[in-house]
Image (cartoon, rainbow, N blue to C red):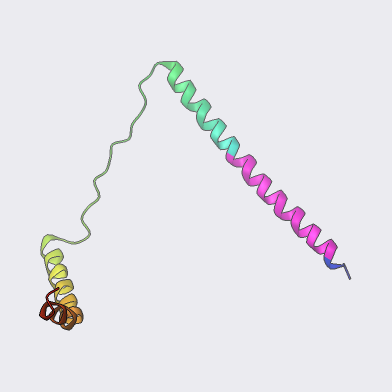
Amino acid sequence: MVSILVQERILGAAMGAAFGTGVVLYQQALIYRSTAQAIEFISGKPPVVPPSKVPEPLFNKRTRAELGHAWNVGVDKSLGALIASLSSRGW
């Protein structure tokens, strides 16, 4: 049976190795990205900019209006008594 101290050291080494690997891979990606940008800049070609996409609306106009109305009715039903109470006190 391996002692708890040895288990903790093995776990620490494994976690350190995983973290170190992650840092190294992240740094490599940054280096590759920066060199690719430098090469594009030096080549004199204009950068390729992908066209921006306008997201489509989630619901059509009628559905949005119905959803807004349902929301307002729900808020009125849940908070109506509180609003009436505060209004009667002059808030």
The answer to which image quadrant residue 12 occupies is bottom right
Q: Which of 6 and 61 is in front in this view?
A: 6
Q: Main secondary structure of the magenta part?
A: helix
Residue drawn at x 16%, y 78% as measured from the top left: 86
Q: Nearer the viewer, residue 88 or 5?
A: 88
Where is the N terminus found, in terms of image quarters? Answer: bottom right
Q: Which of 59 and 68 is in front in this view?
A: 68
| Residue 14, percent from left and from top | 74, 54
- Tell me which segment is drawn in magenta: 5-26
Rendered view: 58 above or below 39: below
**Extreme right residue here?**
1
| Residue 90, percent from left and from top | 11, 75
| Residue 34, percent from left and from top | 51, 28
| Residue 27, percent from left and from top | 59, 37
Residue drawn at x 67%, y 45% as measured from the top left: 21
Residue drawn at x 87%, y 67% as measured from the top left: 2
Residue 87 is a magenta residue: no
Residue drawn at x 71%, y 51% as measured from the top left: 16
Query: Could you tell whether 21 is left or right of 71 in the image?
Result: right
Q: How many marks are shown on the rendered structure?
A: 0
Query: Could you tell whether 25 is left or right of 59 in the image?
Result: right
Query: Could you tell whether 83 is left or right of 29 in the image?
Result: left
Q: Nearer the viewer, residue 43 or 87?
A: 87
Rendered view: 85 above or below 10: below
Where is the C terminus found, in terms of image quarters? Answer: bottom left
Rendered view: 76 above or below 30: below
